[in-house]
């Protein structure tokens, strides 16, 4: 059975401008929508390209072709029927190849206004992108014009009220940097969940956020996508984290009007964290926590502790006292440090190398524990807990 998608319709509802594409398929919702506040409506395109990209993975999960009654970018349509699917099939072999059918059209370039945007969640990756490409010192043609915050499935349990609360918190941080933050709310995640419960956010976020980026193509020439991994971690193959393929996949997601460009892959996570040390907004507002969805750091989860240890190793811990509870960190510091010293993960190795680079000598107690089997046992227990949470369907957050 084919998935049929009609022409995008635009309407206003309360404070929102809604861009909606009717969808016809018995297993899927009846429409796919993106919406933003009315004051940002002029930035948004009514073209069907975002819908085409948003629906390709759900369609591949169902094994159903997609037929559009309207036009799709010539470049995007070619890539959707070729290399994009090749990469997605390598990442998630349970997907199936499909055909995306539409009239192809070459989108226009930007003769005048050519904006640059990036997604912003106030994590290490997105804060680093904001710092590197801030208008005060960005390379020519890459100066940020505005930021976006997308609701495309990273936090399944949240509702619109939660999304707006997070947006308002992030908006204050963006304002401190002199930039507008444009919200994009979508029901895209409902299509992924209806198509297959085996597809989670970490395995699909590049495509989901790439679809949101295409909304801005009428006035935006570049969307800078914050990479989660350094270039040395790039590969195309079976993985639960699509970010490993970003340098290969992201450039294929654009149209003739907008490039989707991976940025930050030249830096390790340690180097990105160090790059934020002088950013006063980051010192107060860095948000890396995976357990607290209110925009606050718990200072005890894996990502909080990893960031805090990095800050301590590089001599920047006290600068971020407003963003973290250093008392909680001190309670967990020795344990986490010992686990890192013995760890074999990419981030463990990065922190081990940083200790050598910055001549950081861990406390004697941490070194003694690391020499025992305690960290290894703790690591196995954590892995077992993760497996149980996954089996029970517990959501996992994602910070960029």
Image: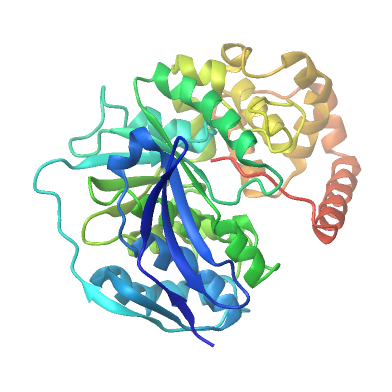
Left or right of 213? Residue 295 is right
Residue 208 drawn above or below residue 396:
below
Query: Residue drawn 24% across and 72% down?
Result: 74
Residue 80 drawn above or below residue 293:
below
The foreground one among 308 and 18 is 18
The answer to whether residue 179 is visible is yes
Location of residue 188 in the rendering, given as x and y in whole percent from the top left corner: 54, 58
Left or right of 376? Residue 102 is left
Residue 165 drawn above or below residue 3:
above
Count how many numbered circles sit on residues in the image: 0
Task: Tell me the quadrant of the picture where the N terminus can be found.
Answer: bottom right
Instruction: Determine the residue located farthest toward the bottom in the rendered image.
Output: 1
The foreground one among 63 and 132 is 63
The answer to whether residue 234 is visible is no
Location of residue 117 in the rendering, given as x and y in whole percent from the top left corner: 33, 40
Query: Residue drawn 35% across and 31% down?
Result: 132
Which picture quadrant has residue 202?
bottom right
Left or right of 171? Residue 29 is right
The foreground one among 133 and 62 is 62
Query: Residue drawn 34% across and 63% down?
Result: 49
Which picture quadrant has residue 210?
bottom left
Location of residue 4 in the rendering, given as x and y in whole percent from the top left corner: 45, 78
């Amino acid at each position: 059975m084919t998935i049929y998608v009609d022409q995008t319709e635009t309407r206003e509802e309360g404070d929102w401008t809604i861009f909606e594409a009717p969808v016809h398929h018995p297993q899927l919702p009846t429409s796919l929508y993106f919406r933003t506040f009315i004051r940002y409506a002029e930035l948004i395109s009514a073209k069907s390209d975002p819908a085409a990209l948003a629906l390709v993975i759900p369609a591949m999960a169902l094994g159903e072709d997609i037929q559009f009654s309207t036009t799709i970018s010539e470049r995007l349509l070619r890539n959707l029927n070729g290399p994009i699917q090749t990469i997605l099939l390598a990442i998630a072999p349970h997907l199936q190849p499909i055909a995306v059918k539409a009239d192809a059209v070459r989108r226009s370039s930007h003769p005048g206004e050519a904006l640059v945007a990036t997604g912003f969640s106030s994590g290490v990756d997105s804060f680093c992108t904001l710092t590197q490409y801030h208008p005060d010192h960005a390379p020519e043609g890459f100066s940020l014009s505005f930021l976006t915050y997308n609701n495309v499935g990273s936090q399944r349990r949240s509702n619109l009220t939660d999304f707006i609360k997070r947006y308002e918190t992030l908006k204050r941080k963006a304002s401190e940097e002199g930039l507008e933050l444009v919200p994009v709310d979508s029901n895209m995640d409902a299509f992924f969940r209806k198509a297959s419960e085996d597809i989670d956010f970490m395995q699909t976020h590049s495509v989901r956020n790439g679809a949101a980026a295409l909304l801005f193509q009428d006035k935006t020439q570049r969307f800078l996508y914050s990479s989660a991994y350094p270039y040395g971690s790039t590969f195309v193959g079976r993985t639960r984290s699509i970010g490993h393929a970003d340098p290969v996949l992201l450039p294929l997601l654009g149209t003739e009007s907008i490039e989707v460009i991976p940025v930050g892959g030249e830096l390790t996570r340690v180097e990105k964290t160090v790059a934020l040390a002088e950013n006063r907004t980051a010192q107060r507002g860095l948000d890396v926590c995976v357990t607290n969805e209110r925009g606050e750091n718990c200072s005890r989860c894996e990502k909080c502790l990893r960031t805090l240890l990095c800050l301590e190793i590089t001599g920047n811990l006290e600068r971020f006292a407003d963003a973290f509870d250093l008392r909680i960190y001190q309670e967990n510091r020795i344990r986490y440090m010992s686990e890192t010293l013995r760890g074999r993960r990419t981030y463990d190795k990065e922190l081990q190398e940083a200790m050598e680079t910055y001549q950081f000598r861990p406390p004697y107690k941490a070194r003694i524990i690391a020499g025992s089997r305690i960290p290894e046992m703790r690591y196995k227990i954590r892995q077992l807990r993760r497996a149980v949470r996954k089996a029970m369907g517990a959501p996992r957050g994602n910070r960029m």
